[in-house]
Amino acid sequence: MEARMGGTCWVGIDSCKRVGKYRGWAVFWHDLSGRYGFADYPDITQLMAEHDAAECLLIDIPIGLPETSQQNAARPDQKLRSRLPGKASSVFNTPCRQAVYARDKQSAKACNLQVLQKSLSEQSLGFTPKIREVDQFLLEQPQYIGRLRESHPEFGFAILNGNKPLVSKKTFPEGLKERTQLLSEYFIQAGQAMTEIENRYPKQLLDDFIDAMVLSVIGRLGMQYGFSTIPQRPVGDSRGIPMEIVYCEPCLK
């Protein structure tokens, strides 16, 4: 089921692995009527154009980039790690904006070390092109600042699991099954949707789509119960983009 929906739907977005022709963004959306859809998009501009009317758009990519050590301390990354015991490694260090726009990996590492006194892992470096893509989009189209918001899938799963992180690996069948079953408690079509996704996409992308699905569910719950943020009072970066992780705690309300 892949219906295009308007302003009543909630969209979750995750970076898509490089597998064959797939290298952009994995997206899942649903609405209160039970309709849902999923697709991959080559770039954030096309994605946002097709889902411009959505009520909520949550993405798993750093939004709001530090340009100084002081700004880096205001990023939510460290506080988020403390909320994910056993899964803290799922939160990677956000590169500074200067490193994001560096010409190559070595320059990015050197730049980040100079600005933030920290090097960058291969994981962080691997996400740098996607971080730059989203940052450029927001700087060029500032009307989306505050609409396209950063969230975190593993934190979303932990919230839905009573604030207990899921320690299983979603790249393994049992981890994917555990997450699908958990999502089914909040979105009854989760199992059906994952079966359809499995029939359409390579298995290497299934964890990207389950992450997009949980962000879609968190988006719906947030619109129903209200969003919270890490930190509670987000600080904007030097370009005025909030540095925050958006989530909802329906079980606590």
Image (cartoon, rainbow, N blue to C red):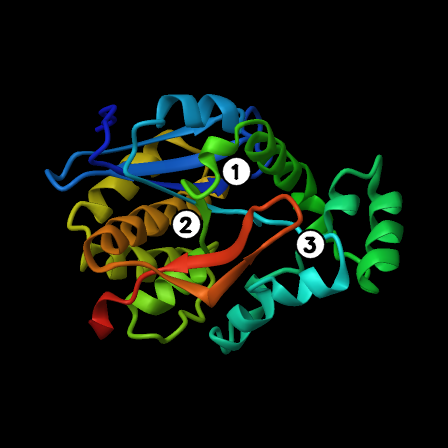
Q: Is residue 159 left or right of residue 59?
A: left
Q: Which mark is residue 221?
A: none
Is 199 placed above or below 84 here?
A: above
What amino acid is found at the position of numbered circle 3 in the picture? Pro
Residue at the image position 30 percent from the left and 49 percent from the top: 219
Along the line of sight, which residue is nearer the eye, 92 or 55? 55
Q: Is residue 4 left or right of residue 127?
A: left
Q: Is residue 17 left or right of residue 163?
A: right
Q: Are marks 1 and 3 in contact (CB under 8 Å)?
A: no
| Quadrant for the C terminus in the image | bottom left
Along the line of sight, which residue is nearer the eye, 228 or 89? 228
Looking at the rendered image, the disc whose residue lies closer to the viewer, 2 or 3, is 3
Q: Mark 2 = which residue?
A: 211
Q: Mark 1 = which residue?
A: 16
Neighbour tally class for label 1: few under 14, some 14-19, many 20 plus, Cα within 10 Å: many
- Distance from disc 1 to disc 3, alpha carbons, whole Å, reads 24 Å
| Quadrant for the N terminus in the image | top left
Residue at the image position 83 percent from the left and 46 percent from the top: 108
What amino acid is found at the position of numbered circle 2 in the picture? Asp
Q: Pick whichever of labels 1 and 3 is earlier in the sequence.
A: 1
Q: Secondary structure at mark 1?
A: loop
Res. 47 image quadrant: top left
Res. 196 image quadrant: top left
Q: Are marks 2 and 3 in contact (CB under 8 Å)?
A: no
Q: Secondary structure at mark 3?
A: loop
- Distance from disc 2 to disc 3, alpha carbons, whole Å, reads 25 Å
Is 166 placed above or below 1 here?
A: below
